[in-house]
Image (cartoon, grey):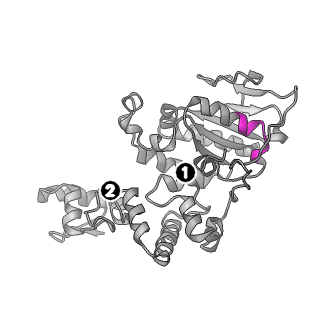
Amino acid sequence: MVECNICKKEFKEDKNLHLHIKAHKLAIGSYYHTQFPKYDLHTKELIKFKNKEQYFSADFNTKRNLKGWLKNASLEKAREYCKGLLVKRKKEKSLEYTPTEVELRTLLVPPISYYQTIFRDYYKLCEEIGLKNKLGPLPKKRQDGKIKFEEEFNDEHLIYVDSREQNPLKIKDFPTEVKGLKFGDYCLNDKDKTGNCYIERKSVPDLIGTLSSGLERFKNEIKRAEEEDAYMVILVERKLEECLAFNKLPYVYKKNTRVTPDFIFHNVRELIQKFAHIQFLFVDGRVECVRIVKKLLLTKILKTKFDLQLAYDLKLL
């Protein structure tokens, strides 16, 4: 039961309470702001209200405010707070695996690089609080700052492109062949070389459709990959920060007015936690997609499982 804090009337569920709040001539956000005020730890402004869960879990209104607060906090306090975020999320969301860079960057929490700075070993920290590491630390860098994975292929190698791929990437300098694939859009004709890796390309509209009305179909595709012991990289041809604000991109959003970035990335995080054999990677445009497809399929980069988004964000790929 939930109680109206104004008139003390009880209701079975929050939705019933929220309907009742209108009788007090209040918006839902105004009700929580007046009855349960919460303030940004950095700016001391009221926490913006989106929904009840978000309101009571948020300590900051923006990542900039979080960053500002952490900058002024002592190392001990920053460690305590950041570790607490992971512990709280593990408990509330029943997490099994260490959160990836994509998961952290789509939440109001610091990225892996910050955890590395204050704890030195993010993955060890996550193990200590009971999470499983399905990805390992980044490989060692070369002198030029990149991760060393040389292209290794011969005249018999070619890239398969799924026959259902509606807007295939233009891979001009490597042989390709159109072929019906059970899952994914791109793979090499040598499973052993890539660790049986398949790449599923997504434009932003594709991502929105797949992670909303097409979610169950996509889950079935991921399960087919799992049955074949395949590894799937969902490669999105737009930067993560732009995808997080796709509602501000008119050419993308006008056909998807009922779908929000919060909803889409909630589903992204759910998939990452549910399936150990997938990763999401967001890159800067179709030309970058071509480069990354070749990097993933023509080297042994996926023989060692590490966080691709983290490596990309740090400009190591």
Q: Position of residue 209 (x, y in %)?
A: 49, 34
Q: Which of marks 2 and 1 is nearer the N terminus?
A: 2
Which residue appears farthest toward the bottom when viewing the image?
76
- Quadrant of the image for the C terminus? top right
Q: What residue type is labelled 2?
A: Asn
- Quadrant of the image for the N terminus? bottom left
Q: Is label 2 in contact with label 1 (beta carbons under 8 Å)?
A: no
Q: Residues within 10 Å of mark 1 (few under 14, many from 20)?
A: many
Does dot 2 land on a helix, a strand or a loop?
loop
Residue drawn 53% across the image and 67% down it: 90
Q: In screen coordinates, is 280 left or right of 31?
A: right
Q: Alpha carbon of mark 2 to alpha carbon of mark 1: how far? A: 22 Å
Between 18 and 191, the residue placed more toward the observer is 191
Q: How crowded is mark 2: few (under 14 residues within 10 Å), some or many (20 or more)?
A: few
Q: Position of residue 96 (x, y in %)?
A: 61, 63
Q: Position of residue 75 (x, y in %)?
A: 49, 75
| 59 lies above or below 302 | below
Magenta stretch holds residue 298 = yes
Q: Position of residue 64 (x, y in %)?
A: 39, 57
| 36 lies above or below 200 | below
| 282 lies above or below 61 | above
Residue drawn 28% across the image and 57% down it: 48
Residue 183 in sight from this viewpoint: no
Give the residues in magenta.
294-302
The mark lying in front, picked from 2 and 1, is: 1
Dot 2 corresponds to which residue? 51
Dot 1 corresponds to which residue? 102
| 98 lies above or below 300 | below
